[in-house]
Image (cartoon, coloured by chain):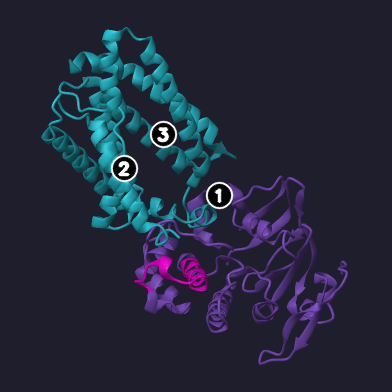
Amino acid sequence: MTTLDFQSPTLRRGTFQLAVGAVAPSPGRITVLLGPNGGGKTTALRLAAGLLTPDTGSVLIDGEPVHALSAPQRAARIALVTQRPDVGAPFSVREVAALGRIARPADAQRVERALQRVGLAALADRPYHSLSGGQQQRVAVARALAQHEPGGVLLLDEAFAAVDPPEAAAIVRAVREEAAAGATVLAATHDMAVASAIADDVWCIVAGQTRAFGPASDLLTAGALPALLGVAIAEAHGANGRIAVADYRAILPTQAL
Amino acid sequence: MAAPVGAALGVPALIGAVTALGVVLLLARRGGSIDPVTLILSGVIVGAIASALSTVAESLLPPERRGLLAGWLFGRIPDVPDPGALTACAIAACGLTALAATWGSRLDAAALSDDEARSVGVPLAPMRTAMFLGCGVATAASVALCGPIAFIGLLAPHCARALVGPRNRMLVVGSAVAGAGLLIGADALRQWIDIGGGRLPLGAVTAVAGGVAFLVLLRKTTGAWPR
């Protein structure tokens, strides 16, 4: 299993500074990143993907600084779904999904399987740009699943945004399967229902700093979340035991736990 | 007359092109990598400055030499090409086509957003620099040989894409073949049209025909791809 270790990386960009401290998401578990817009979730994911170099500290993957690895070396261990996937060429859905394998041995079966897992097998020959925004988001997930090696790191930045609940459920199932196979999954989301459905652990980042990191059973509750996110939480109990929904009628002051 | 003109203009043109290439490269680099939008804007601005300098240089020439420069500026296939420029052109064209075909899948992935491209394993910064320098040298060599011939480079990939699809491994080779075909076609058209006082300059034919074709293409594809 691949290990991911944030060793107090700091990064300053203009007036924003990220300093999340020491955090080590566990292999085989899904860590959900929560926090307000501009709080540093995407920056943390880009650091984990090796796309940014920290000013101080480091992010280690299997003990090596991730930003120091070559792009193909990173691709072998880390797959990333970005917040705004984009394709600037008239490729088909299958061709876009297969781009996940360009630095890995070609594997057409894995690409087909990835498309099946996100419910896009029937649209594989369609032009990518003929799809809706939510479907394009699912293609990006399929590309990452085609790239992802069992036991590697899977980074999802709002991968469920604009995706309808049935398709989101398919992605949730696929992500759970990867975690069960040993993947270290870091997923940023604003959707509290999605967070409740997939989180084993919760990492809350506010204003560039870690406000809380721990088991979802402790943090993803109507008691703890309001202090972290500054909004009241209405909690319902569904099939998995809990569904947390932000109650936007009540804005609360945030505080460190 | 072609050989003396080529010999007189080829080397200065090559030096000027390489200088412009270096300036554009310096201007387009941001955070250690080439930014495509800055690259295009820098290229347009440096191109405009270079064009103005060409006009100044032309005005400084003795009147009997201006015609030769004007002929080169319109673009033409020289009857007796300068061997040095021809060799540089052939090496750059063949080498770059082979390199781009080898990097086909990386170039495909470069169509993704920068973060996605890097995450699937594309060494984006060195690849962009290599492609910029390769394309720049190939363009500089061909312009030194033939003068500026408009729109062939813009139209050829679109023609090739219609025939071989969007995957770069085939598209790059197809574009090279399509570019050669378009140039030969434009030269044949130029020789076929008699305007009384001689033949049309090749650059004028490609600019008019290519410009119209490109506008049609733009009209046809706007809104369909890429959004």
Q: Do pointers 3 and 1 mark residues of a single chain? A: no
- Mark 1 belongs to chain: A
Q: Determine the residue positioned at 47% across, 56% down.
A: B112
Task: Tell me the element at label 3.
Answer: helix
Chain rendered purple = A
Q: Name the residue under label 3.
A: B133
Magenta residues (range): A124-144
What whole-number distance in Å separates the C-alpha atoms at marks 2 and 3? 26 Å
**Around disc 3, counting alpha carbons within 10 Å, would you say few (fewer than 14), some (14 to 19), or many (20 or more)?**
some
The residue lying at 67 percent from left, 56 percent from top is A43
Question: Is A145 left, or right, of B157 in this rendering?
Answer: right
Please tell me whether mark 3 or mark 1 is closer to you in this view. Answer: 3
Q: Mark 1 points at which residue?
A: A69
Amino acid on which disc 2 is placed = Gly
Q: Name the residue under label 2.
A: B211
A236 and A47: which one is in front?
Answer: A236
Q: Distance between the residues labelled 3 and 1?
A: 25 Å
Give the SS element for disc 1.
loop
